[in-house]
Structure formats: structure tokens, C-alpha cells
Image (cartoon, rainbow, N blue to C red):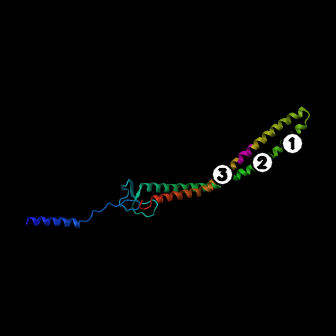
């Protein structure tokens, strides 16, 4: 009877082993896997994940996101915001730059006219000085030549400065008009990299 009882117990234990439910395996954590508590963190296979909403998606479902994903996504969002602000500022600068170019070009025309007039006066005075015979005639003419020469140099210097200013303004305008497209391309690349890092399963 005792032997039979032992055998029966063994069968019951064996049966229990056979019908026991297998242990539930821990879910694999990766980008896109659902989670419940926002802000919760977990590490798996050397990578750290945080529970939250994907900054790149309009879906507000809580999922695990790698720290690299969150860093890249937030960097993209900040870059996009900064680029938008810069683009607005650049657009506002263009009319100001255009006005500056217009004014400088008008000043250039006037200064060039004054230079031409002054050069003519200098040439005329130099001719009179060359023709003068008496010292009493030469003295005022010599002073006049020096004065006209100084004026020519001043107008020439001003023309050079205006020309340089126009070139700088035109360069600024070129930057203001081309920079938005460059920023847009950079932002697109940043977004694509963030999307890749945040892909489900990573």
C-alpha cells in the first residue's frame, strides 16, 4: 500500500510538471514597443530606453524609445525651430539690404560726378600753373593744385569705400536669399537621421 502511494504521488508530480504553464519571457525592448508609465527607463543589451511619446510622430501612444532616439529627435526639433527663426530674420533683412544697395549706388554716382569735375579742375589748374611766368601767379596756382589733388584723392578713396560697401551688401543679400534653402536641406538630413535612429525595432 505504501509503495502504491509513492507511485501515485510521483504520477501526480509528473502530471503537474506536464501541465504547468511555461514561464512568460520578458518582452524585448526596442523603439516602438508599447509601455505604460511615461518617464520610466529600462536598460537592455547595453542600451537605455525611456517610456514616452515619439517627438517625430503625431501619435501620442506611449512607447519605449532609445536615449539616442530621443536625443536625435529633440536635436532635430530644435534645429528646425532655429532654422525657421533664422529664415524669418533673413527675409526681413533683404529689403533693408536692397535699400542700402540703392543708397550706396546713388552715392556712388554723385561721388563719381564730383571726382570727374574735380579732376577737370585739377587738370585746368595744372595747365595754368605750367603757363604761369611770375611767382605771384604761381603761388596761388600751386596751392590750388595741391587742394584739387587732395580732393581727387578724397573722392577716389570714397568711391573705393562705396564700391566695397556695395560688394559686401550684395554678398549679404546673396547669403540671405540662399541660406534658407541650405538650412532646409540640413534640416531634412537631420530629420532623416533621427527617423533612422528612432525606427521601430532599434
Can you give x and y, in whole percent of width and height, for residue 43 in the image? Answer: 36, 54
Characterize the magenta stretch by its predominant secondary structure. helix
15 in relation to 41, above or below: below
For the C terminus, the quadrant is: bottom left
Judge whether 137 appears above or below 185 on screen. above
Along the polypeptide, which appears first: circle 3 or circle 2? 2
Could you say which is closer to the camera, residue 67 or residue 80? 67
**Horizontally, is 72 left or right of 163 in the view?**
left
Residue position marked by numbered label 2 in the rendering: 112
Sooner in the amino-acid sequence: mark 1 or mark 3:
1
Which region shows up in magenta? 157-163
C-alpha separation, residue under disc 1 versus residue under disc 3: 40 Å
Q: Is residue 80 left or right of residue 173?
A: left
CA separation in Å, label 2 and label 1 = 18 Å
Q: Dot 2: what SS?
A: helix
In the image, 152 versus 137, the foreground residue is 152
Q: Are marks 3 and 2 in contact (CB under 8 Å)?
A: no
Q: Residue at x 91, y 33 (%)?
A: 134
The label number, if any, that marks residue 37 in the structure image: none
Circles 2 and 1: CB distance less than 8 Å? no
The structure residue drawn at horizontal position 19% and vertical position 65%, both measured from the top left corner, is 14
Q: What crowding class fits label 2: few (fewer than 14 Cα within 10 Å), some (14-19), or many (20 or more)?
A: some
Q: Counting other residues with Cα less than 10 Å from the Cα at mark 1, is it few (<14), some (14-19), or many (20 or more)?
A: few
Residue placed under numbered mark 3 in the picture: 171
Give the quadrant of residue 30.
Answer: bottom left
| Residue picked out by circle 1 | 124
Amino acid at each position: 500500500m505504501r509503495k502504491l502511494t509513492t507511485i501515485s504521488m510521483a504520477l501526480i508530480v509528473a502530471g503537474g510538471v506536464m501541465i504547468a504553464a511555461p514561464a512568460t519571457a520578458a518582452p524585448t525592448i526596442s523603439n516602438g514597443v508599447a509601455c505604460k508609465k511615461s518617464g520610466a527607463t529600462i536598460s537592455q543589451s547595453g542600451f537605455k530606453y525611456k517610456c514616452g511619446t515619439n517627438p517625430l510622430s503625431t501619435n501620442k501612444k506611449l512607447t519605449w524609445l532609445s536615449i539616442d532616439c530621443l536625443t536625435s529627435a529633440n536635436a532635430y526639433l530644435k534645429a528646425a525651430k532655429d532654422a525657421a527663426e533664422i529664415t524669418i530674420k533673413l527675409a526681413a533683412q533683404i529689403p533693408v539690404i536692397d535699400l542700402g544697395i540703392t543708397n550706396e549706388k546713388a552715392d556712388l554716382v554723385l561721388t563719381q560726378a564730383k571726382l570727374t569735375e574735380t579732376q577737370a579742375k585739377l587738370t585746368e589748374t595744372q595747365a595754368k600753373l605750367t603757363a604761369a611766368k611770375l611767382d605771384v601767379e604761381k603761388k596761388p596756382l600751386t596751392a590750388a593744385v595741391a587742394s584739387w589733388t587732395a580732393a581727387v584723392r578724397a573722392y577716389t578713396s570714397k568711391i573705393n569705400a562705396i564700391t566695397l560697401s556695395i560688394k559686401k551688401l550684395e554678398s549679404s543679400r546673396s547669403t540671405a536669399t540662399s541660406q534658407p534653402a541650405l538650412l532646409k536641406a540640413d534640416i531634412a538630413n537631420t530629420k532623416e537621421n533621427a527617423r533612422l535612429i528612432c525606427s521601430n525595432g532599434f
